[in-house]
Image (cartoon, rainbow, N blue to C red):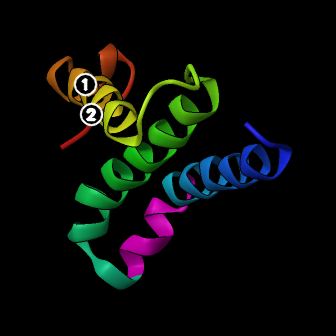
Amino acid sequence: MSARIRYRNLLMVLAGVTSLLLKRWFAKFLGDFALSYVGNLSASFAVYFIISMAAIPRLTRVMIAVLALVIVEGFELTNGFGIMTNV
């Protein structure tokens, strides 16, 4: 993976984390929708790019997306791995 792609992926992870941290600020404008879904969307976004940075080069984007989906759904099913609450 080239340095440019790694840098882009890192920026995308930071964007997802920033969005997660600003969820309550978004709630001022979007109401309950933001509290319910912005966190889930931004966490999923960040997980995808974290996996793509750490992934074996032979993994396709679809395989990375499926792996990210499994992780995020595991997070949902265990109610935030017992650490965080979620929708």
Q: Residue at x 39, y 33 (%)?
A: 64
Q: Position of residue 71 (x, y in %)?
A: 32, 24
Q: Residue at x 36, y 28 (%)?
A: 84
Left or right of residue 14: residue 27: left
Left or right of residue 76: residue 14: right
Q: Foreground residue, 65 or 33?
A: 65
Q: Position of residue 85 (x, y in %)?
A: 29, 33
Q: Which residue is mark 1?
A: 70
Q: Which residue is mark 2?
A: 69
Q: Position of residue 59 (x, y in %)?
A: 45, 27
Q: Are marks 1 and 2 in contact (CB under 8 Å)?
A: yes
Question: In what element is the residue under mark 2?
Answer: helix
Q: Give the number of the disc on residue 59.
A: none
- Distance between the Cα atoms at labels 1 and 2? 4 Å
Q: Is residue 76 magenta?
A: no
Secondary structure mostly seen in magenta is: helix
Count of numbered marks: 2
Q: Bin the neighbour count of mark 2 within 10 Å (Cα to Cα): few under 14, some 14-19, many 20 and up.
A: some
Q: Residue at x 31, y 15 (%)?
A: 82
Residue that extends furthest to the right in the rendered view of this protein: 3
Q: Bin the neighbour count of mark 1 within 10 Å (Cα to Cα): few under 14, some 14-19, many 20 and up.
A: few
Q: Quadrant of the image for the C terminus?
A: top left
Q: Eyeballing the image, is 45 above or below 77?
A: below
Q: The disc labelled 1 sits on which kind of residue?
A: Val
Q: Which residues are magenta?
A: 21-28
Q: The disc labelled 2 sits on which kind of residue?
A: Leu
Residue that extends furthest to the bottom in the rendered view of this protein: 29
